[in-house]
Image (cartoon, rainbow, N blue to C red):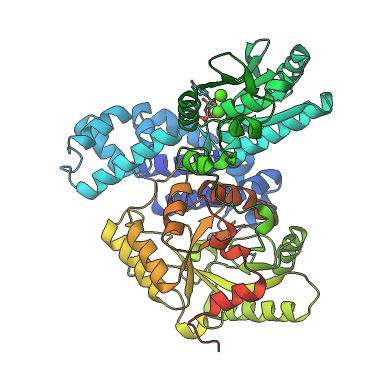
């Protein structure tokens, strides 16, 4: 977890524990809101030292501002620590389950005597939760989903956090050992959405020297294992980093082996075996005479088995082995194919940069367009724009574009909130003035499958709505996807010509890899958006592209690969420009 995630989590806990202690509603809500602000703005909040500056953020009052400063100074919030003393630890542990709020947790704790997550799971599976007053089968199902989500993400870091740490390590090592060949391996090289531990591979004829440098890195808080070819350290965040050093002639074989996935490697080994060959981290060998056939590069390793070399992102045994054998690997989208970002926020809603600053940042990234999609009127907590303010913003965007002094076209947009009936924030007259209408769900996450599905489908039937943002609503490690019939949503997206988003914000990556494969197979277009709330967030595109690659997407699947005029043509299709 990085510091902003920790801060966000602290406020979330504060909200839940305060609610258990019967704190007044507005305080509980203020803590929830602070958690959400920390999610998107944690880093910059923690960079401030001044109460006044902090209070400039909408939603941050004196009390919250003081707590942020305290967290910055001490790493914790005393009010939270006090509450933790007062609430039973077992109950606090139950609160970690996503989809289980304080009221229900307490009820289950008191009425059923449930003390651990295991007991909670058992009680849910035996349908003992549904029988409690105020719960019912849907709530029980949601809690089980929450437990499952927790089990698959606990102890794992978000891709972007692990990626930054890896970059730092690689940079520090390169300083001490210029010219050393290193590469990430494991899940990080495959750019999986969460990372268990970081694997790094190096090629050197002097491994002892490499190990020495690695084990004495500043970020190596603790050395867990120090060997001749493998060492493991723990960072201050509690993340394990494994370094393996191999001989240059074995680098390709080791890279192939340690990149995985394990499922992919099992299949590759089968293929070698069928062919009278053996593959391990040292190379590919012919069984009958032990002759070494390959090992220096990954390409040679795969080609010695009659395969093309699959990009690391798709090595998950989802058909890439067969495709590599046939020589028919997909041409995956690359960062250089991306012409722009289709989801961001300015300081008009809950972002911090103005239109000109956002546009400058997009210029630096080499983009041709940037869609400004500030929150719409109904999402008041995120500073949603009332009709008049939105129309003024549209005018400002048109004026900026008309100046012709930028390589980036700003697209006037909005991120609408899909309400409980599938209704949207503005009337068609307003929507018909926007280039990009994005719609998404921001509440009612625990509704039943039919209701949520109907909301999304109703929104897509509005001809102005062209993109559904973060279609499953998940927050990795915090909130599982809402219950929704994605097949029905994808089918309607295809039918209505609506794109589904790949939201690249680090804890969203939504749609995720497998859903992207399904959507593109159905002929649904994908819109990449970082959901940037500040200029630096535009860099999340890296993880969006990586996730697109994991979903086997090529440039033809992505709206963002279109040139500006092609994109505008697509966005205005079937709407009638006014
Ligand atoms: P992670 O760390 O849980 O995010 O996932 P990975 O894929 O990085 O897994 P890790 O760190 O346990 O192992 C790194 C790679 O080593 C893995 O992707 C495949 C490779 N490998 C080769 N043989 C084995 C094996 O017998 N067991 C495991 N776990 N990995 C193996
Ligand atoms: Ca790993
Ligand atoms: Ca590992
Ligand atoms: Zn957004």
Ligand 2 shown in quarter: top right
In this rendered view, identify the residue nearer to me: 504 or 526.
Answer: 526
Which quadrant of the view contains residue 211?
A: top right
Horizontal arrangement in the rendering, residue 390 relative to residue 152 (left or right): right
Residue drawn at x 30%, y 57% is: 447
Q: Indicate whether 50 appears above or below 563.
A: above
**Whether residue 413 can be seen here:** yes
Give the total number of marks visible in the rendering: 0
Q: Single out the residue that lies furthest toward the front.
A: 288
Residue drawn at x 50%, y 49% is: 551
In this rendered view, identify the residue nearer to me: 307 or 143.
Answer: 307
**Whether residue 134 can be seen here:** no
User: Percent from the top left, x then y, of residue 50?
Assistant: 71, 48
Q: Single out the residue that lies furthest toward the left.
A: 131
Residue drawn at x 35%, y 34% is: 94
Horizontal arrangement in the rendering, residue 311 relative to residue 470 (left or right): right
Residue drawn at x 73%, y 22% is: 248
In this rendered view, identify the residue nearer to me: 144 or 64.
Answer: 144
Q: Indicate whether 261 appears above or below 131.
A: above
User: Percent from the top left, x then y, of residue 312?
Assistant: 58, 38
User: Percent from the top left, x then y, of residue 504?
Assistant: 56, 52
Q: Indicate the quadrant containing the N terminus: top left, top right, bottom left or bottom right.
A: top right
Q: Indicate the quadrant containing the C terminus: top left, top right, bottom left or bottom right.
A: bottom right
User: Percent from the top left, x then y, of residue 232?
Assistant: 62, 18
Horizontal arrangement in the rendering, residue 313 relative to residue 516 (left or right): right
């Amino acid at each position: 977890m990085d510091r902003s995630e920790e801060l966000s989590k602290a406020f979330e806990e504060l909200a839940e524990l305060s609610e258990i202690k019967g704190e007044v509603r507005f305080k509980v809500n203020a803590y929830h809101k602070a958690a959400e602000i920390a999610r998107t703005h944690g880093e910059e909040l923690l960079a401030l030292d001044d109460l006044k500056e902090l209070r400039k953020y909408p939603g941050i009052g004196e009390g919250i501002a003081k707590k942020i400063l305290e967290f910055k100074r001490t790493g914790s919030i005393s009010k939270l620590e006090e509450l933790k003393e007062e609430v039973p630890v077992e109950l606090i542990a139950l609160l970690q389950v996503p989809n289980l709020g304080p009221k229900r947790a307490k009820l289950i704790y008191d009425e059923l005597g449930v003390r651990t997550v295991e007991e909670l799971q058992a009680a849910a599976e035996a349908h003992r939760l549904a029988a409690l007053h105020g719960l019912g089968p849907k709530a029980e199902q949601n809690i089980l989903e929450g437990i499952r989500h927790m089990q698959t993400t606990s102890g794992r870091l978000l891709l972007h956090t692990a990626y930054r740490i890896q970059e730092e390590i690689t940079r520090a090592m390169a300083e001490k050992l210029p010219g050393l060949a290193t590469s990430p391996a494991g899940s990080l090289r495959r750019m999986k959405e969460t990372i268990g531990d970081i694997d790094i591979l190096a090629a050197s004829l002097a491994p002892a020297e490499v190990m020495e440098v690695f084990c004495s890195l500043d970020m190596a808080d603790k050395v867990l294992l120090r060997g001749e070819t493998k060492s493991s350290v723990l960072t201050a965040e509690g993340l394990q980093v494994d370094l393996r050093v191999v001989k240059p002639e074995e680098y390709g074989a080791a890279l192939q082996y340690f990149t995985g996935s394990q499922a992919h490697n099992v299949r590759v080994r089968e293929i070698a075996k069928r062919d009278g060959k053996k593959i391990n981290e040292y190379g590919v060998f012919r069984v009958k005479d032990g002759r070494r056939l390959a090992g220096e590069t990954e390409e040679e390793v795969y080609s010695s088995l009659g395969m093309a070399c699959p990009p690391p992102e798709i090595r998950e045994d989802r058909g890439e082995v067969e495709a590599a054998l046939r020589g028919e690997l997909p041409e995956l989208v690359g960062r250089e194919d991306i012409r722009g970002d289709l989801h961001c926020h300015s300081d008009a809603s809950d972002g911090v940069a103005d239109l000109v600053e956002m546009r400058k940042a997009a210029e630096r990234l080499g983009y041709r367009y940037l869609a400004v999609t500030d929150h719409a009127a109904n999402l008041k907590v995120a500073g949603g724009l009332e009709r008049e303010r939105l129309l003024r913003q549209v005018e400002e965007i048109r004026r900026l574009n008309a100046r012709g002094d930028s390589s980036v076209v700003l697209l006037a947009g909005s991120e609408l909130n899909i309400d409980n009936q599938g209704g949207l924030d503005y009337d068609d007259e307003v929507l018909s003035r926007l280039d990009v209408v994005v719609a998404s769900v921001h509440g009612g996450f625990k509704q039943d499958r039919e209701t949520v599905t109907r909301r999304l489908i109703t929104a897509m039937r509005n001809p102005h709505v062209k993109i559904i943002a973060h279609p499953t609503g998940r927050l990795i490690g915090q909130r599982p996807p809402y219950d929704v019939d994605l097949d029905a949503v994808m089918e309607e997206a295809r039918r209505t010509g609506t794109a589904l988003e790949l939201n690249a914000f680090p804890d969203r990556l939504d749609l995720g890899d497998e859903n992207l494969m399904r959507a593109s197979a159905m002929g649904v277009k994908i819109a990449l958006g970082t959901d940037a709330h500040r200029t630096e967030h535009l860099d999340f595109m890296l993880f969006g592209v990586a996730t697109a690659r994991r979903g086997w997407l090529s440039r033809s699947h992505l709206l963002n690969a279109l040139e500006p005029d092609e994109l505008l043509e697509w966005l205005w299709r079937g709407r009638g420009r006014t």
